[in-house]
Image (spheres, rainbow, N blue to C red):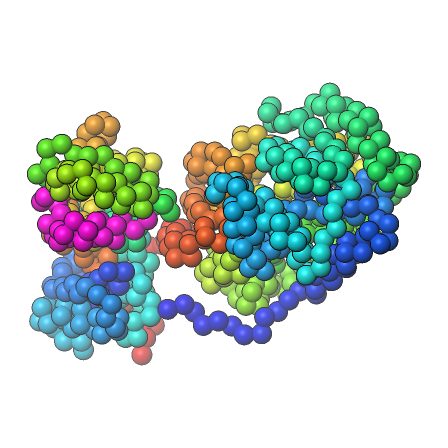
Amino acid sequence: MNAPVKKNVVKEPSMLRQKEMIAQHFRDLARAKEQGKKVVYTFVPGNLTELMLSFDCLPLHPEINALQSGMRKLSGEYIAEAERAGHSEDVCTYVKCDIGMMLKGNIGPTGEKLPEPDLLLLSYTGCFTFMKWFELLRERYKCPTAMLHVPYQGEGHFTEEQVQYVVDQLRSEIIPKFEKVTGQAFDIDRLRDLLGNSARAEEDLVYVLESAKKRPSPIDAYFGGVYYIGPLFTAFRGTPAATEYYRMLREEVDARAAAGQGPITPDGLLDEERFRLVVEGPPNWTHFREFWKMFADEGAVVVASTYTKVGGTYDRGFRHNPERPLESLAEYCLGCYTNLNMPTRVDMLTNYVKDYEADGFLINSIKSCNSFSAGQLVMMRQVEKRTGKPGGFIETDLVDPRYFSASNVKNRLESFFQMLAQKGQEVPA
Amino acid sequence: MTLAAGIDVGSAAVKAAVVRDEGNDPVMLGYETVRIRRRDLDEVVRAAYEGALARSGVSADDIAYVATTGEGEGVPFRTGHFYSMTTHARGGLYLQPGARAVLDVGALHGRVVRMDERGKVLGYRMTSQCASGSGQFLENIGRYLGVALEEIGELSQRADDPEACSSICAVLAETDVINMVSRGISTPNILKGIHLSMAGRLVKLLKSAGCEGTVLVTGGLAKDEGLLAAMAEIAVERGLALSIENHEHSILAGAIGAAIWGAFRHKKLAQRRALPV
């Protein structure tokens, strides 16, 4: 009873470019030890990529490996392995997927063995689980660990003292540790160059994300958005390759917008934009395409999402600044989405609904992600009250396939779309 | 005058109704409900439709519009399909003009739809994923206890000391029930315990959707008087001004609503001279 599936899946050239960038990165990782490169494990929120690159280190993101394993249908097996090793069913499934992958030989998403870390770098930006995760990895790898403590934005904004507190840690803890691990001296001019590249890429990313204000939106800012943030949120921020990728992406999006086209979905160009949505929460990765199709089949386009801000809230105006290198790294970490308090998150969602002229907003509550899921029902009621737009609530998980119930999700999405569809409709007497 | 048929394809049964619309006062002429029971869905749909036509004393040629709802989008002879939220709201209003919300409790989900005096949907809430399948769960428990679905409501109302059970998870609740049976808890007390746990969640749903006044229960569990009594008890306990009611045709709300929407759509198409050929 579903609409017929369209043939000829279209992929954006930028998507292919990104795929090649990622493949090259994993090839570099696989050869890191023989080429004398140091490998730093770190997380996306609050990542200090430019600093790592200035020391010629190769970053590796355990949660990205986990989501890639989820998309490649490997996560179920890894999670089972971690649970056999004693990890509870309630633990974050990114963690269990990574631990399971490690226990099964640490073969990365591209089929090559991942190198062990020379340094574990934790920028603590609101997710307590990250800290416990690295404690487990430290136990396993017995390697040096560096922790940058980033104060939570409990008041909804950060202060000069907080920025200074983070900068002091960068100077006294993080940079000396990099110098010790790599044997290289810190080169602030190199860092400045990389930050300059970042700022250009960030400008283009924001341009692309804000293109969703057009009607029809030329992008899907959630399902497509997670691809668009890829280079900037992971190993490539600060590199010329990332800057070039975003220039290319911007041109692609501009071309679609000029032609009055919608986003590219798993089935090709979306024919008709029926609903404009704002989405809160990470996507499900194990059934990513199936999940996306549930939206695309109904003509639902996500025009703004919060998950695409976990690696930086650039649309709120932040840019890395070569003139203030350490300060801007500190401000970047402080402003990460997971480090924001609930009223700020409600403000962001409310503004997205208004600024992007959304018809409604949807929360995808993740079973095993406390950082995102805590308080989401309250957030939904607040946003509904402030915007007057209907909210929907579905439940899935990051990479545990056991928690994705397609019929339940579809059932709830259908009700949500029904609610949106009947707005403004004439009713029979 | 327009004759329209509504067909509501649910997960457990197909309901069909025929409505005569003469302007502002639609009237249901006849209906049919056929349980699916793993039979070919096309045959069940056809049986429900033909049953409703026969009981209405009309033929298929008299029907100007066949409207489907629920999972009926694939019915080959449909004229158009309508979302179940709007059809339940309109059908609920037909059955109980004072209702300002319908609580659709079926095999797959519990959902409350809040509406205005014209049946226009104002908002909705659904049970969380873990409380899905309430109807199916109750049927399973009935089977386990050796009680027919129709007997559950009456037995539940005979309880004198209901035994609490998990309200979060059907699997946990089934374990509770097995334990209760082995402890010698009476069937009425077990059933009432289950009804109270389900009712607790449904009343919470009504409250969170902002419902007040009359609520009409639709869907497969609308006939379960035990569930309704448990909901009424809990609403009183929580001080909510709710009158939770059912109707002898509650289960037909979706089909009736679809037929009314179908007649309306037919008139609109006729006005625009855009009727399907």
Tell me: residue A298, above or below residue A127: below
Q: In this view of the protein, which residue sits in the foreground, A36 or B215?
A: A36
Extent of the magenta region? B132-156
Tell me: residue A218, above or below residue B38: above
Describe residue A107's horizontal placement relative to residue B68 as left or right: right
Dividing the image into 4 quarters, which one contains the N terminus of chain A?
bottom left
Instruction: Give residue A64's position: percent from left, percent from top.
Output: 65, 50
Magenta stretch contains residue B150: yes
Instruction: Give residue A380's position: percent from left, percent from top.
Output: 45, 38
Describe residue A212's horizontal placement relative to residue A186 as left or right: left
Magenta stretch contains residue B249: no
Residue B272 visible: no
Q: In this view of the protein, which residue sits in the foreground, B270 or A201?
A: A201
Instruction: Give residue B199's position: percent from left, percent from top.
Output: 23, 39
Dividing the image into 4 quarters, which one contains the C terminus of chain A?
bottom left
Instruction: Give residue A4's quadrant in the image.
Output: bottom left
Tell me: residue A232, above or below residue B77: above
Instruction: Give residue A7's quadrant in the image.
Output: bottom right
Instruction: Give residue B208's position: percent from left, percent from top.
Output: 33, 36
Residue at (27% x, 60% y) in the render: B11
Residue at (67% x, 37% y) in the render: A139
Q: In this view of the protein, which residue sits in the foreground, B48 or B138?
A: B138
